[in-house]
Amino acid sequence: MTTTAHFYVLAANAETEPTQSAHFDLAARTVAQQYRQGERVFVYVDDVSQAHAFDELLWQFDADSFVPHNLQGEGPKGGAAVEIGQTPPVGRRTVLLNLATKLPDFIRRFNHVIDFVPVESAAKQAARERFKALRAMGASITTTEISQ
C-alpha cells in the first residue's frame, strides 16, 4: 500500500510574526477533523515539552468539540483516539500528524502522513528534508498553502 502525505505550507503574513502557535493551532484543528472522520491519529513530537504544549492546546477546545487524546503512557489501555508521543504508538493508528523536526523510524506503519511547513527558515528547511524522505519512499504527496 502506498503512503499518502499532505503538507500544509504556512504562508508568511506581512502584519504578524510567524509563531509556533499558528503551526500548532492548525495542527490541532487538523487532528480534530481527522478524529471526526473516525481516524485514530498519532501526533509525533520532538520532546516532552512539545507533547505537553500540544496536549494543553487540545484541552482548550470547547466541550462540544472535545478530541479524546492522551500522552503516551497515559489514558486507556489501547490509547485514546489521538495519542501524542515520541516512540511508536500503542495499537494501530492510520494517520501520523508530524510536529517533529524529523520523520519517525516507524513511518511505514501509517497510511497517511500530515506534516507542516512553518514560515521560520530552519523549520522550513527541516520540512523540505521530510518532504524529500517521503518522496524517496514512494509516498503520494500533496500540498495546501495556508495563510495565517
Image (spheres, helix red, strand yellow):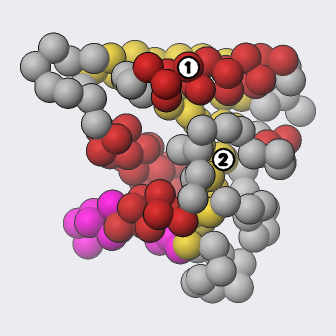
- Identify which residue is drawn at 83% across, 45% down: 105
Query: Is residue 53 shown in magenta?
Result: no
Residue 37 seen in render: no
Disc number at residue 125?
Answer: 1
- Identify which residue is drawn at 62% across, 63% down: 85
- Classify mark 2: helix, strand or loop: strand
- Classify mark 1: helix, strand or loop: helix
Q: Quadrant of the N terminus?
A: top right
Q: Amino acid at mark 1?
A: Gln
Q: Is residue 30 above or below residue 32?
A: above
Provide residue 125's location: percent of width, then percent of height. Answer: 56, 19
- Identify which residue is drawn at 49% across, 25% down: 122
Within-10-Å neighbours for mark 2: few <14, some 14–19, many 20+: many
- Residue matched to label 2: 95
Residue 35 seen in render: yes
- Identify which residue is drawn at 30% across, 44% down: 21
Provide residue 69's location: percent of width, then percent of height. Answer: 50, 70
Disc number at residue 65?
Answer: none
Marks 2,1: beta carbons within 8 A: no
Q: Residue furthest front?
A: 122
**Horizontally, is 59 left or right of 76 in the view?**
left
Provide residue 5's location: percent of width, then percent of height. Answer: 66, 28
Q: Amino acid at mark 2?
A: Val
Query: Is residue 63 shown in magenta?
Result: yes
Q: Which sits earlier in the primary sequence, circle 2 or circle 1?
A: 2
Q: Is residue 122 above or below residue 54?
A: above
Report the span colored magenta. Answer: 57-70
